[in-house]
Image (cartoon, helix red, strand yellow):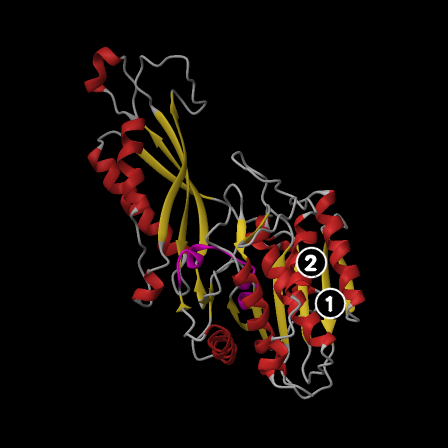
């Protein structure tokens, strides 16, 4: 059957209903609801006739659902990757976060953008192909993992259990753009120690809060040394997200007439493949040296977060000439009639994702491309219905191209 005919066979209502059923699972990270959704996905994979694995990890407390559509042989294999766990609901919602509401333009729900619509898109792509009687040469592996929000232990568990392929698609929300590079993250704490005085003698003090106010915009404006190109530098960013200032390291607050002699800042740095943690820390240290010179008597210390016992997201990069990139570009143009935006596209390029683990641990070539993004992590989180349905069609064409019809 012609690929254009196949993508016309997508049952739009059934696909939206399936996504809504996923949204109705309250799958907060590290809860029983997360386990329930993994079990549900494993059951749905079995209904498709796929080899289904409900894979335990973290001493059996958490589960991935993984399905394999075995090919006839002779084709390349393709792995899809997405997480089932969600962030918590915030204030400001006007619709039921777990209702799976569908109107004429959007489907709503917590986690629908990050990233159940991506999960449902590749599930529905495979289901549509199977229902149409398609047989492939190469294998398709569908991984529905958990723990991406904690640094990716679910994907790492799947990798170490032997799941791999020639290429991968990570379905994190990118508004259907082909993201070929994303940053690595470094979390750090900065401690500023000044010298207190009563406000009557403020001129003699070294004000830690004033120093914090000086350094925060400088760090927020930073890019880091060692960028391999301007595109790489484009996903550099520093950010301070937590500030506490008061008296002493205990941050005593009951004496506001005194100048604060201690401030603790917590932040993150995002940097591209080819740049190093050591280089970023050196750049931050240089900024703190400048701060100490502007505030004589101030002591500034940077404490990088230890990675021991906690996964961090590696950077990810793939050549724009890779077969998987060209394949998804071609599929997008077939479906939408225009070239697909491709590259280190922001804001997605600032994210971490499990693509970093697939790239770093296995050396796999892949792409980050999924529905959702513009309404991500906000009240009334939602995804454009048209984007979700087009993503299914794009994934179908990508599967047919990479894995080949038997």
Up the image or down, 224 lies above or below 74; here it is: above
Q: Which of 146 and 21 is in front in this view?
A: 21
Q: How far apart are marks 2 and 1 (CA)?
A: 17 Å
Q: Quadrant of residue 18?
A: bottom right
User: Magenta includes 185?
Assistant: no
Q: Mark 1 points at which residue?
A: 67
Quarter of the image for the N terminus: give it.
Answer: bottom right
Q: In which quarter of the image is residue 302?
A: top left
Instruction: Mark 1: give few (<14), some (14-19) or many (20+) Cα within 10 Å.
Output: many
Sequence-wise, which precedes: disc 2 or disc 1?
2
Q: Please give left or right for residue 2 compared with residue 25 in the image.
A: left
Residue in the image at 32% along x and 45% along y = 220
Residue 395 visible at all: yes
Quarter of the image for the C terminus: give it.
Answer: bottom right
Where residue 362 appears, x then y in whole percent? 58, 70
Where residue 194 appears, x then y in whole percent? 30, 26
Q: Name the residue under label 2.
A: 18
Q: Is mark 2 on a helix, strand or loop?
A: helix
Residue in the image at 31% along x and 33% along y = 212
Up the image or down, 258 lies above or below 352; here it is: above
Up the image or down, 204 lies above or below 321; here it is: above
Q: Nearer the viewer, residue 311 or 320?
A: 320
Q: Nearer the viewer, mark 2 or mark 1?
A: 2
In the image, which residues are magenta?
A: 345-360
Residue in the image at 76% along x and 65% along y = 45
């Amino acid at each position: 059957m012609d690929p254009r005919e196949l993508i016309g066979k997508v049952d739009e209502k059934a696909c939206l209903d399936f996504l809504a059923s996923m949204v109705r699972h309250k799958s907060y990270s590290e809860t029983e609801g997360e386990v329930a959704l993994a079990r549900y996905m494993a059951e749905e994979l079995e209904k498709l006739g796929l080899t289904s694995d409900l894979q335990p990890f973290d001493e059996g407390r958490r589960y991935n659902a993984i399905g394999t559509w075995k090919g006839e042989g002779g084709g390349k294999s393709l792995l899809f990757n997405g997480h089932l766990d969600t962030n918590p609901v915030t204030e400001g919602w006007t619709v039921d976060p777990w209702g799976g509401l569908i109107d004429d333009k959007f489907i709503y729900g917590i986690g629908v953008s990050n990233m159940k619509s991506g999960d449902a898109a590749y599930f529905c792509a495979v289901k549509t192909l199977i229902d149409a009687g398609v047989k492939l040469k190469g294998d398709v592996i569908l991984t529905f993992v958990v723990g991406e929000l904690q640094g990716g232990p679910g994907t790492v568990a799947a990798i170490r259990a032997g799941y791999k392929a020639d290429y991968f698609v990570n379905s994190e929300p990118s508004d259907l753009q082909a993201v070929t590079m994303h940053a690595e993250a470094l979390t750090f704490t900065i401690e500023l120690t000044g010298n207190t005085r009563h406000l009557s003698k403020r001129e003699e003090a070294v004000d830690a809060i004033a120093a914090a106010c000086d350094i925060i915009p400088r760090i927020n404006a930073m890019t880091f040394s060692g960028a391999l190109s301007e595109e790489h530098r484009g996903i550099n960013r520093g950010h301070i997200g937590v500030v506490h200032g008061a008296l002493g390291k205990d941050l005593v607050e009951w004496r506001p007439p005194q100048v604060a002699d201690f401030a603790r800042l917590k932040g993150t740095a995002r940097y591209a493949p080819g740049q190093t943690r050591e280089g970023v820390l050196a750049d931050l240290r240089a900024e703190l040296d400048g701060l100490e010179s502007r505030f004589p008597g101030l002591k500034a210390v940077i404490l990088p977060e230890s990675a021991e016992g906690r996964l961090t997201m590696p950077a990810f990069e793939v050549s724009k000439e890779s077969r998987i990139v060209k394949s998804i570009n071609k599929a997008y143009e077939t479906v939408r009639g225009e070239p697909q935006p491709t590259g280190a596209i922001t804001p997605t390029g600032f994210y971490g994702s499990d693509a970093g683990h697939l790239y770093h641990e296995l050396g796999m070539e892949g792409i980050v491309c999924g529905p959702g993004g513009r309404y991500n992590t906000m009240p009334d989180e939602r995804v454009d219905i048209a984007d979700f349905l087009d993503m299914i069609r794009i994934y179908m064409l990508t599967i047919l191209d990479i894995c080949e019809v038997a």
